[in-house]
Amino acid sequence: MTTGSRKDPAPPVASAPAPARRGEDTVASLRAELDARDQFLDLAGHQLRTPLTPATMLVHLMQADPGLPEHLHEHVRMLRENIEREAELIDELVDLGRLSRGKLSIVSESGVALDTLLENTVAAVKSDADAKRLRLTTSLTATRTRLAGDATRLGRLLRTVLNNAIVHSVAGAIDITMVDGHDGTAVIAVADQGSGISETDMSELFSPFPPRTGPSRKATSIGAGLAIGAAVARLHGGSLTANSAGVGRGAIFTLTLPARPAVVLPG
């Protein structure tokens, strides 16, 4: 008879069920694939952007040359606009990768003149509106027009909203207003009489990867401009929203940003 004590066997170590482990592996694999995709978008964007820099410089030199033959002026203008559009698409591609990784950022500077940015953007898209015989009407009555922000990104945001209105309009006017909002904000509204937005499309309007089957608002460029614009607005402490009465009844995009008066009056 054995008198020594006997140790009980160690309890079995619990392990995750095989389906759970497979699920974890799948999630890890998807994350790795998404990281690789985003890194590719970032690298591809920079590589595509590089050859456009000398082309842009050359076009600007051609436009500044007083000896440029008159019959080439329009061709050079079209060349410049297409190079700029290509650069915008590449920037959108790069920003899409940053947005999906939560790394979209702004470079803030003080005293950004929002009204001047808006006026310059309206002037920049006027030729596109004229080509479709659309009228651009402006009413800028805001007294709060200055903010600390990223002028480059805000300019792109405004251009995205205006281009969106032009692309989806076939006739009539595009009304652009800038007024003082509540709680120290400036409010820019862009109202078009175009294709409108269905309820289905509205729910996906600010998605980085919107579906391509919506009947009302088809994607312009790669379709991420509004998502990037909404993120830029949030980074400035503001918002970008959209409203529409339905398909064929136009749309209104509203950008709200914290702002202050251009001149501080003595109190």
Image: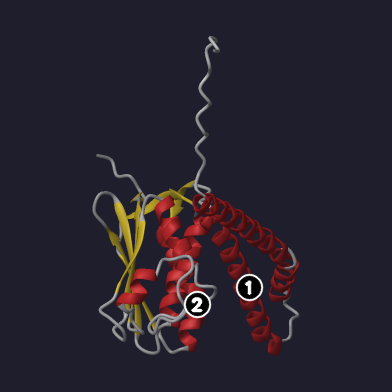
For the residue labelled by badge 2, is the local secondary structure a helix, a strand or a loop? Answer: loop
Quadrant in which the C terminus is drawn: top left
- Determine the image quadrant of residue 192: bottom left
Residue occupying image coordinates x 49% and y 62%: 155
Density class for disc 2 (Cα within 10 Å; few <14, some 14-19, many ≥20) is some
| Three-letter amino acid code of the residue under disc 1 | Glu
Work out whether 82 lies above or below 170: above
Residue 157, position as x, y percentages in the image: 46, 64
Numbered disc total: 2
Residue occupying image coordinates x 53% and y 16%: 6
Residue 35, position as x, y percentages in the image: 61, 54
Closer to the observer: label 1 or label 2? 2
Return the disc, 1 or 2, that comes first in the chain's sequence: 1
| Three-letter amino acid code of the residue under disc 2 | Thr
Camera sees residue 81: yes
For the residue labelled by badge 1, is the local secondary structure a helix, a strand or a loop? Answer: helix
List the residue tagged with mark 2.
Answer: 220
Residue occupying image coordinates x 69% and y 63%: 44
Residue 258, position as x, y percentages in the image: 34, 51
Q: Which mark is residue 86?
A: 1
Camera sees residue 176: no
Q: Nearer the viewer, residue 90 or 181?
A: 90
Q: Nearer the viewer, residue 89 or 152?
A: 89
Work out whether 31 lies above or below 159: above
Q: Is residue 113 left or right of residue 34?
A: left
